[in-house]
Image (tube, coloured by chain):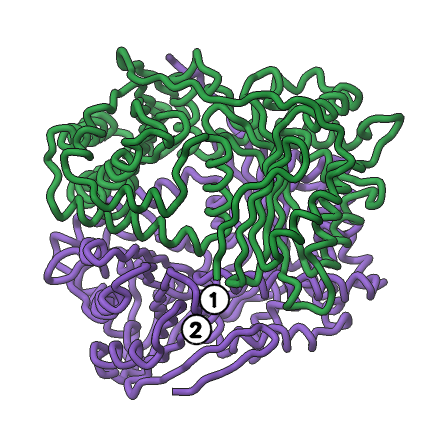
Amino acid sequence: MIRKEYPQLREVYWEEVLPNGLRIRIVPKPDFARKYAFFATNFGAIDTRFTVDGQRVTVPDGIAHYLEHKMFDMPQGDAMQEFARCGGNPNAFTSYDLTAYYFDCTENFEENLKILTQMVFMPYFTQASVDKERGIIAQEIRMYDDNADSRASERLFAALFQHHPVRVPIAGTVQSIQDITPQMLYQCHKTFYDPSNMMLCVVGDVVPQRVVELVAKLAPESVGQTVVRDYGAPEKLERPSQSVQMQMDISMPKFDIGFRCQPPGSDALQSELIGDLAAEILMGESSPLYGRLYKAGKIDDSFGAGYESTKGVAMLTVDGDSDVPQEVLAEILKEAERVGAEGFDLARFERLKKSAIGRRMRSLDSFEGICYQMCAHFFEGVDYFAFPHSYAGVTPQQVQAFLRQTVRADRMAISMIYPTQQEETSC
Amino acid sequence: MILLNRRIEILPGIFLRTVTSDKFKTGCFSVNLLRPLCSAEAAKNALVPSVLLRATAQYPDIAAITDHLDDLYGATLGALVRKKGEVQMVGFYADFIEDCFVPEPVFAPMVDFLGQVLCDPLLQDGCFTPEAVEGERQNLIRVMQARIDEKRSYATSQMLQTMCQAEAYSEPRLGNAEELEDVTPQNLYAHYQNLLATSRIEIFYLGRQPEQVVADCFTKALRGIQRRACVAVSTQVVQRADAVRRCSKQMDVTQGKLSLGLRTGCTVTDANYPALMLLNSILGGGVSSKLFHNVREKRSLCYYANSVLEKYKGIMVISSGVALDQMQTAEAAILKELDDCRNGVISRQELDDAKRAVLSALAAWRDAPGALDDYYLGMAVAEGMQDLDALAQAVKPLQLADVQAAAQNLTLDTVFYLTGVEK
C-alpha cells in the first residue's frame, strides 16, 4: 500500500491496487463520526455501444441507470434492508460516464462495506424483478420530464451534438427501457463491473489496511475482457448554431446555452480549470458583463456558467432564468469577442485563481465531493488532489485563447423553455 | 476536536453561540434577525438581505463585493431566510477558508465585512439606492413566482397554505409578491432600521477561532447598531385536526403529486418528541421506512414517498410522486401504512432499524456545519429544546408502545392532489 501526501491541502491518501485491478483509496479523517464509502464503476449512460473481445454490442438507452436500480437486489433479499440493519445509509447514482454506489454510517463500518462490496459484484436479476422496476423507473423519467432544469439541459445536449450518446437523457426514455432484459443487465455487469474497471474510495476514521483486506477477500478475479467503447464519429466543433424551445408549466423562461470545446487531451484536469476560469473571467459575478446584465434585470442570481466534459465531448455551459434569453446570448457573444481580442485585467485573473483554489480546497470538507472527484478524475487519468499545482500552471494566454476559440456562434446551441398558461386551483 | 460552547449575549439582545472545531477546512457563521412570521412584513424582511448585499459604502457594486470576496480566497456571504414554525429568521450565512490554510487572515476581514454590510450600506439621499431596491424587488418576485417550477415543493406549499389558512404559518417563508407592491427605497430603509433595532439577533459560528476572539470580532463589528426592546416571537400549535380538507390543482405535468398534512400534537420541546421522531423514521424517513419499502418498492406505486416533520409547528407532511391514474390507490396505500403504525403493526426489525438510522443521523450532525447551525438556531427559537446528545439519549430506550402512541396522536388535516391537464 502506498501513502501519498499533499501538504498544501493537508490531505493524505492510502492506495492499493489489488491483483484483480481494483483500485482502493482511503482518505483518513480522524475526529469524524461519519464514515463514507464510494464504489464507482467506469460505466455510465453514454456507454451503450461497445465491442467486447471483438464482438459488437448495442444496448438500450438508460441501461446503466436501470442496472444501478437492480444492483440493490441480492439473492438473500434487498441490500437496502441489509444496510438498514447495520445502520448504513446507502444510495447510488448514474451519470453520463460513471455509476456509483455508496453509503455513510457512524457505526458498523466494516459490515456496511461488506454489504456494499458484495452488492456491486453480485448481479442477481430475475424477469419478475426486472419487470417490476420498469414502473418505478418510468415514474422517475416522468419526474425529470416535469423538471424544467433537467429538460432544458437534456434538450441542449441533443441540439449541441450530432451523434454522441450524451444527446440521450441519462435514464433513457419510457420507450427505450421497455426492451431491457435480465440478460442485457448481466452482460453489462460482466463487461463493466469488472474490478479492473472500478474504484473504491473510503473517507473517515478507518484503518486503511483493514479496508483493503476486507475488500480483497470479497472482490472476484478479473474476467479480463477487452472492451472498446464507441461514441460515434468525432463531433464537428464548427457548424451552424442551433436553437430549440418548448413550453412547460413554469413561471419564467429558462435558458441553457452550450459552446462545444475541444474534448480534453491528456490533462483533463487542466482543461477543466481553464474552462472554469474562462467562464469566471467572461461572465462571473465580478465581470463587467455580469454587472451589466444583472443591473439591467436581464439575469438574476440563478445565472451560472462552467465547464463540463465527458468522454469524447466537452462544453462551456451557461444557464439561468431570463425574460430575454436571446439578448443575454447576444451580449455573451459580443463580450467574448471583445475579451478574446483585448484580453482582461491580470490582477483580476490572479484573484479569480486564488478564489478558485480556496473554494476547491474547501470542497474537500465534503466526503461525497472527495470521493466523486477522486474517482471521476482517476477515470480520466488524472490525480484530483493535484489541482493546486494545475492551477499554478494555467496562464492568462490559455484562458484568452480558450474564450476566443470557444465562445462563438458557430460553436453554440441554445435551449429555451417558456411558460404556458396556468390552471385554476379548486379548494 | 469539537467543543460546543454556551450561548452568550455579546450586546443587548445579540446572542452568540460558537462551536470550536479544527475538523474542517471551512469556517462559517450565520447572523439571524428573528421576526414574527406575518404578511405585514415577511416579504419586506426577506428583501432586506438581498438589498444589503448589492452595495456597501466601501464596496459600491456587485463587482466590487465579488472582488473583495475573491480576495478572501473565494469566501461567500449569502442572504439566508428561514422559517421555523411561525418565526422568520432573516440574515446572512458566510463560509470561508480557515486562516491556517492560506497566507493571510480571512476570518476577521469576513466579520468586518459583514459589519459593513449590516451597518454601512451604500446610501443615496439617506436611504437605500433605488437601483438596489427595485432590482432585488424584481428578483424576489421572480423567486416567489418560480415556486410553481418545482412541482414537489410546490405541492407541499399549496397543501400547507390550505391546512394553515387561519394561522400565521400559512405565510410562505419569503412572504408573497403583493406585500412588495408599495416598497420604496425610503420605506424599506426605515423598515430596516426598525428591524435592526428591535429584532433579537442570533449568531452562530463554527471554526477554529476561540470563542473570545469570535465574540470580540462580532462585538466590534456590530456595536454601532442602535438597539431597543426586542419583538417577541412564538408559534401557535394546533393540536388536532377536526375534519379532513381536500383540495387539488391541475397542471401540465406527466407525474402527479400527492401531499398530506397531519397534525402531530407534539413539537420539538415536548417530552414525547423523540418518539414522534422515531415514528417519522419508521413511517417515511428513509429507505428502510414503510412508505419506501411497501408503497414504492413492493407495490411500485410511486417514485418517491416520504414523510417529514415540521418540528416547531407540530405538523407532519407526507409527499409522493405518483402516476396520474394511481393517485387514489397511492393515497389509500399511504394511509394504510399510517394505520398500521397506529395499530402497532411495527416489527422489532423496523423499530431497531429506525432507531439506528435516527441515532446515526444525530451523530453525523456533528460532522456537518450547516446542520449544527440549523439545530442550534432552532434551540434559540424553541425554548426548552434538547441538545443533540440529550435527544439521542431520549431515543435509545423508546419502545413500540411509545411509537404507537405518537402515531395515535396524528390526525389527518389536509389532502392535496396535483394532477395533470386532460388533453
The tint chain B carries is green
Q: Are marks 1 and 2 in contact (CB under 8 Å)?
A: yes
Say which residue label 2 marks: A27
Q: State the residue at coordinates (38%, 22%).
A: B159
- The image quadrant of residue B406 is top left
Total numbered circles? 2
Q: What amino acid does circle 1 point to?
A: Ile
Image mark 1: chain: A
x and y, in percent, of residue A427 in the image: 37, 12
Q: What chain is the purple one? A: A
Locate residue A281 relative to residue B205 in the image: left or right.
Answer: right
Is B329 placed left or right of A331 in the picture?
Answer: left
Distance, label 1 to label 2, CA atoms, is 9 Å
- Locate residue B363, reporting x and y percent: 36, 53
Q: Which image quadrant for residue B278?
A: top left
Looking at the rendered image, the quarter that the C terminus of chain B falls into is top left
Q: Earlier in the sequence, mark 1 or mark 2?
A: 2
Q: Which residue is mark 1?
A: A370
Q: How far across and down, in percent of the image, does residue B201 sit?
A: 62, 33
Where disc 1 sits, the SS reads helix
Most foreground residue, B98 or B74: B98
Q: Residue at x 21, y 69 (%)?
A: A118
Q: Badge 2: how crowded within 10 Å, few (<14), some, or many (20+)? A: many
User: Where residue B101 is drawn, which disc sits there?
Assistant: none
What residue is shown at x 37% (from left), y 40% (from top)? A143
- Asked which secondary structure carries label 2, the reply is strand
Q: Is residue A413 visible?
A: no
Would you identify the image quadrant in which residue A416 lies?
top right
Q: Residue at x 35, y 33 (%)?
A: B309
